[in-house]
Image (spheres, rainbow, N blue to C red):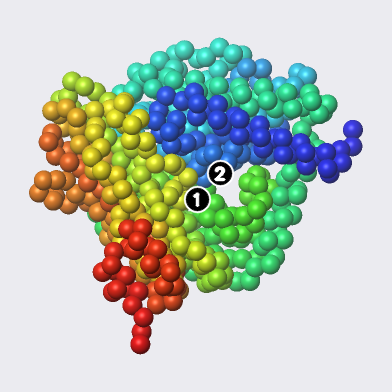
């Protein structure tokens, strides 16, 4: 049957609805708060060639864009002729999936009329996979937990019980891990069921026509957006905190007629701690940042991703090679949008925001070794985004990760911690014609007479978010322990003793434009809302006579 463009567009819209339902199935069924409450997932549908056709809006670029390539890899690894209905494949290999061991990626072939017509896939974060856990202290990948190569998790509907027992035996949270794996399975099955239902309703026997339409339409739209850009190469260097020493990230962005090339040549080498980044993860966030500006209205799929290319020298910290430690790869991986925007702002100065907090304040906590009450918990909080060329930045907002902040009530219900404070951090947004978004001030302690172990790997302690076009920098992050006002570094393992309170202040975003150009009404609203103090309003926004 020859499909009209109108009919294909209707089916495309329906496919986007299918993946949203698929993603929600994972969130509703998950055990771990970081999945259930924070949306640290991806879900997508792929054609029979392994090309991504649609992705759930809920999810992180680090999961979604790595999944787009991972399915292609698994399709090569496992012959389609050997696949059976009910089979599901999985891996957590950081260089195939999404950059570290804690993310499980599943892929399920979808059968219709006895043929594989496509695949569903999903990724989510498991809270604990053994080893040293979610922290930067590992010296190699073997320190960091259990690595599972590509394998069959479910065979014709039967779960591999031995594999599941191995995962549980290597975790401090075996029940949560088991529940999250079954949630991932349910996500794949939900996508498969709804995809087959859609095909029956539209009376189609395969996805070939729809797949070609989605990919070619998206690719043409993206190429048109690229064609409208100035051509050339722009370079930028971003200085980040690193572990022991500060690190330089280098990028050269080349805009050609039919593609964009991002090259990390010059970036610092890998370090001996787990902040190294596999290239698949660095690519995921870099391309996401570019797509937020270039062809932002075009859905994310194989066609719209195709013109973006990313490379970097093997062994640089944004192209880590096995067996480098990568547990906290998001720490620097989520800084790549600011690196990319430093290049792109030179070509498109009126379209690129100022730098933001960027790296989420991921705070893995677990029991001290001697504690009787054992738990593992991963909290996520966010800082402010950079101001945009025509509007203020967003406060306490997840960009670029998309991972929502941890919920206070849920956290207190599942772990022995008590929150004393959570509020916006006054004066943390960089001053400018448009103000940077504010960070947060959060305080917590243990509810019982026991110590907590904290595994820090955050950024913007030493190098705050820079303003753009005359805007001022945002406030740096700050982590202290009270009483005593003991300042903690941005990375490392820390013991929070019973009776102590952990205080962490997430960074603010940079401002955009000169502060003296901000309107009086905007300044007054900021002061009345408590976002800016009277003192800062007078000192930073005073008018030149």
Q: Is residue 401 visible to the viewer in this orientation of the structure?
A: yes
Q: Position of residue 283 (x, y in %)?
A: 52, 50
Please report contact status of discs 2 and 1: CB closer than 8 Å, yes or no: yes
Q: Is residue 151 visible to the viewer in this orientation of the structure?
A: no
Instruction: Work out whether 17 lies above or below 514.
Output: above
Outermost residue to the bottom? 545
Outermost residue to the right? 1
Q: Residue at x 68, y 61 (%)?
A: 225
Q: Sort mark 1 into few (<14), some (14-19) or many (20+) by Cα contacts within 10 Å.
A: many
Quadrant where the C terminus is found in the figure = bottom left
Task: Find the distance from the CA under tag 2 to the CA under tag 1.
Answer: 8 Å
Q: Please give the label number shown on residue 65.
A: 2
Instruction: Work out whether 92 lies above or below 383.
Output: above
Q: Position of residue 517 (x, y in %)?
A: 44, 76
Q: Position of residue 104 (x, y in %)?
A: 47, 30
Instruction: Work out whether 222 lies above or below 422.
Output: below
Which residue in the protein does label 1 denote?
A: 285
Mark 1: secondary structure: helix
Q: Position of residue 278 (x, y in %)?
A: 45, 46
Outermost residue to the left? 484
**Of 103 and 389, the residue lying toward us:** 389
Q: Residue at x 38, y 48 (%)?
A: 382
**Of 55 and 245, the residue lying toward us:** 55
Q: Sort mark 2 into few (<14), some (14-19) or many (20+) by Cα contacts within 10 Å.
A: many
């Amino acid at each position: 049957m020859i499909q009209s463009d109108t009919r294909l567009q209707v089916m495309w819209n329906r496919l986007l609805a299918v993946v949203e339902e698929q993603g929600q199935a994972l969130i509703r069924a998950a055990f771990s708060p970081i999945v259930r409450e924070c949306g640290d997932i991806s879900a997508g549908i792929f054609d029979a060639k392994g090309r991504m056709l649609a992705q759930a809006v809920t999810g992180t670029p680090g999961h979604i864009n790595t999944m787009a390539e991972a399915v292609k890899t698994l399709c090569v690894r496992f012959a389609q002729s050997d696949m059976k209905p009910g089979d599901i494949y999985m891996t957590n290999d950081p260089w195939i999936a999404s950059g570290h061991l804690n993310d499980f990626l599943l892929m399920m072939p979808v059968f219709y009329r006895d043929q594989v017509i496509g695949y569903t896939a999903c990724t989510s974060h498991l809270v604990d996979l053994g080893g040293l856990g979610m922290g930067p202290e590992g010296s190699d990948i073997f320190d960091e937990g259990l690595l599972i190569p590509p394998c069959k998790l479910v065979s014709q509907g039967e779960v591999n019980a031995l594999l599941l027992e191995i995962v549980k035996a290597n975790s401090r949270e075996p029940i949560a891990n088991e529940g999250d794996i079954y949630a991932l399975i349910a996500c794949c099955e939900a996508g498969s069921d709804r995809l087959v239902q859609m095909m029956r309703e539209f009376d189609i026997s395969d996805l070939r026509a729809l797949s070609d339409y989605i990919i070619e339409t998206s690719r043409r739209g993206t190429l048109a957006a690229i064609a409208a850009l100035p051509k050339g190469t722009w370079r930028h260097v971003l200085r980040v905190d690193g572990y022991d020493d500060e690190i330089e990230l280098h990028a050269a962005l080349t805009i050609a007629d039919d593609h964009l090339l991002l090259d990390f040549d010059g970036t610092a080498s890998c370090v001996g701690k787990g902040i190294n980044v596999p290239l698949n993860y660095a690519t995921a966030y870099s391309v996401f940042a570019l797509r937020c500006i270039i062809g932002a209205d075009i859905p994310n799929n194989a066609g719209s991703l195709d013109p973006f290319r990313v490379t970097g020298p093997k062994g640089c910290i944004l192209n880590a090679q096995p067996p480098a430690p990568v547990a906290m790869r998001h720490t620097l991986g989520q800084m790549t949008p600011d690196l990319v925007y430093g290049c792109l702002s030179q070509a498109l100065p009126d379209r690129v925001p100022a730098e933001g907090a960027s790296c989420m304040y991921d705070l893995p906590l677990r029991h001290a070794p001697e504690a009787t009450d054992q738990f593992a918990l991963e909290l996520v909080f966010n800082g402010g985004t950079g101001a945009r060329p025509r509007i203020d930045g967003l406060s306490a907002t997840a960009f670029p990760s998309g991972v929502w902040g941890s919920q206070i009530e849920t956290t207190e219900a599942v772990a022995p911690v008590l929150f004393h404070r959570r509020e916006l951090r006054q004066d943390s947004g960089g001053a400018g014609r448009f103000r940077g978004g504010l960070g947060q001030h959060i305080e917590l302690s243990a509810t019982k007479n026991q110590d907590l172990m904290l595994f820090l790997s955050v950024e913007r302690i030493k190098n705050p978010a820079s303003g753009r076009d005359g805007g001022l920098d945002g406030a740096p992050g700050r982590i202290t322990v009270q009483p005593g006002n003991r300042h903690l570094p941005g990375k490392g393992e820390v013991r929070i003793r019973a009776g102590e309170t952990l205080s962490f202040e997430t960074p603010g975003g940079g401002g955009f434009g000169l502060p003296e150009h901000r309107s009086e009404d905007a300044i007054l609203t900021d002061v009345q809302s408590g976002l800016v103090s009277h003192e800062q309003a007078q000192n930073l926004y005073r008018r030149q006579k």
